[in-house]
Image: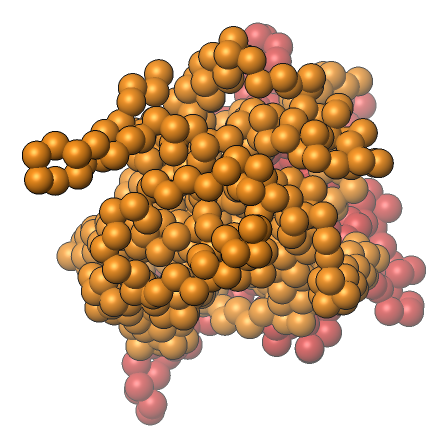
Amino acid sequence: MSETVVNDHQWKMVIDLDTCTGCQACVVACHAENNVPTVGAEEVRRGRSRHWIRIERYWDGEYPDIKARFMPVLCQQCGHAPCEPVCPTFATYHSDTQDLNVQVYNRCIGTRYCANNCPYSARVFNWFEPYFPDPMQEQLNPDVTVRGRGVMEKCTFCIQRIHYGEETARKEGRSMRDGDMVPACAQSCPTHAITFGDFLDPASPIHALMESPRAIRLLNELGTDPAVTYLKGGDSNVG
Amino acid sequence: MLADAQTKFKNLVWPHEENPRERLLLDPIPQEEMNQIMLKPMLSASPAYWLVVAILAAIVAVCIFGVWAYQIRWGMGIDGTRRPVGWGIFISTFVFWIGISHSGTFVSAILRVFNAEFRRPITRAAELMVTISLACGGLFPVVHLGRMWVVYFMVPMPNQRQLWPNLQSALVWDLLAITTYLISSTIYVYLPMIPDLAMARDHTTGWRHALYKITSLGWRGAEYEFHYLHKALNIMALAIIPIMFSVHTIVAWDFAMTQQIGWSTSILGPYFVIGAIFSGVSAVITLLLVVRRTMHLEYFLRPEHFDALAKLVLIFAISWVYFFFNDFFVEWYGGEAAGHALLSFQMHGGLAPYWWAMLVLNIVIPLGTLWSKKVRSSPIALFLITIGINIGMYLERVIIVPGFLQRNRMPFNWGEYTPRLPELSIAFGTLAFFILLYMLASKIIPLIPVWEVLEGQLSHSRRRIGQTVVTSVADLE
């Protein structure tokens, strides 16, 4: 590893649970952007849904005084990720330049140790060869690998869009700015509940959001240092 | 003459009378007769034997390799594993076989180091279990891989990208520990076998003679040869004990080095080691009872050997209970919400039938029966109790591996795991594989270390002192 590595970016995400309506637009957008196949009702019943981002729905209270609470959960891109040290082949490791938790599909041998050790159960496994029913295979994103069977995968914070943003910026002779890219989930959210930004960019709006008194981080007590912050008000109908 | 000796010991009364001459085999018969008792079942095989071998081989071919090929073709999805249960029956069965492999090392190495005389006739059969059960257990980490065809990524070897395995990962420790154990236990089973192979060489012809001639390494039985053999055995016995402890501790660390509730606890290492020896020693009893009956080794395997082994099982049952409650009560009083969810899932949730069955088979039955001399001298009772213990220990592994993974800190992600036919078939297939390998080995390898028995008999003498006769032991080393 080079000794002159500079953290170019520290990607962070803020999800406002008070504006999330649980509409699942982010889930669909993620499937389309990242070539995530659908698996059918039978496999979902077996607990093998393939969403990289999912809407967790919790019921609060008893009928009729009941509230549905929604929480979009994706890979938290932990600063101290439990999945990284357990992988025997370095298929999952920490990218210093992006401050992301990245997955190398070619190195993965499918021990599923990382998935066992993810407190957010954010990782999904390719139990079978991916299948895209006609005409779905016509809309595959050429920038993203289709993963074969036996490989672990998870949310990448749309790393292909990050790289595209960096290359475009380099072409224009500047460094990448906050807002040059948004991940598919944030782009598709109708209520703008998801904000994405670079922590190293002082102008980024995520600074103000992360310092909000409503800010919480998921299972923060485990010391995983997640990059995703949730905003949750006292009396909202969600979260 | 041989037939006489065989019928005499077959009719030995269970429970046997307290005849001191029967203890420690202090009723020597001519060496040649001992050799023949061992060699006769090795050199002849009944049609029933070949029928059983053929059935087992068919089971192994279909249930392990057929199903495995199918799984490689279609993917791990044919099994029951799911989110959040990444490890299922495969890993449970892996831990089970690695646990069984602790039998031989414990019975043989520890009893050898402490000069426990009753070990002499039983060491070989137990040591052989180590190698064979490691072969069975070693299949599973490969079988359960999503992409088993790139399993060599885990092996530290030079490659173009200069990538080494991640030495932080407990799975890499596991790989190194198990290969070390496999190599050292194979050496350890081979060394004391050399004089017996030489004995077999001198009594056989044809391909067997050629095989034993090579494997006995020109053993002549000279004094200096025994001197070096004893020295090598002492070193190996002492060296393999820490390896044995480390292997099962590292298997436990595969689980303990995580943040999963129920797994992340420092007691897991010693708890697994004790559990492994508990199930291993029980398996030695089960196996010796079968070997004794089918190979007519009643002269060598006496009631007092089973009595001594059953006492060991009783001690390890008590130790296992100690560790079980250490684990259980700490979680209970710890009061973490997720931990409590897991405990109630065990006591009255989906795991309850297995959990209570485990407690009955591992605690109630052994502790309730093995204190009794009558039970310890009944082959049928011992057979059933030790089989029960191994079923209980298997359930324990099922509870700890896929059982615990079903609960975590985010209730949305809880999930029920039901094993499906392919994984059950491969797990069952390794039982057939174990029996098959052992049956084949029993025709080639002398299961009783005849030279060690003889050595024990020669070093003991009966002396009359005043009104009593005492057994005196010559200094061995």
Furthest residue in direction left, as rendered: B466
Apparent colour of chain A: red
Q: Residue at x 31, y 77 (%)?
A: B348
Q: Residue at x 60, y 26 (%)?
A: B194
Q: Residue B124 at x, y = what percent?
A: 52, 39
Q: Quadrant of the C terminus of chain A?
A: bottom left
Chain in orange in the render: B
Q: Residue B78 at x, y = what percent?
A: 71, 66
Q: Residue B361 at x, y = what percent?
A: 34, 68
Q: Quadrant of residue B150?
A: top right
Q: Residue at x 29, y 22 (%)?
A: B474
Decide if residue A135 is in sight here.
Answer: yes
From the viewer's perspective, is B163 left or right of A16?
right
Q: Is residue B284 above or below residue A55?
A: above
Decide if residue B287 is in sight here.
Answer: no
Viewer-proximal residue among B2 and A141: B2
Viewer-proximal residue among B74 and A170: B74
Viewer-proximal residue among B358 and A21: B358
Q: Residue at x 34, y 26 (%)?
A: B459
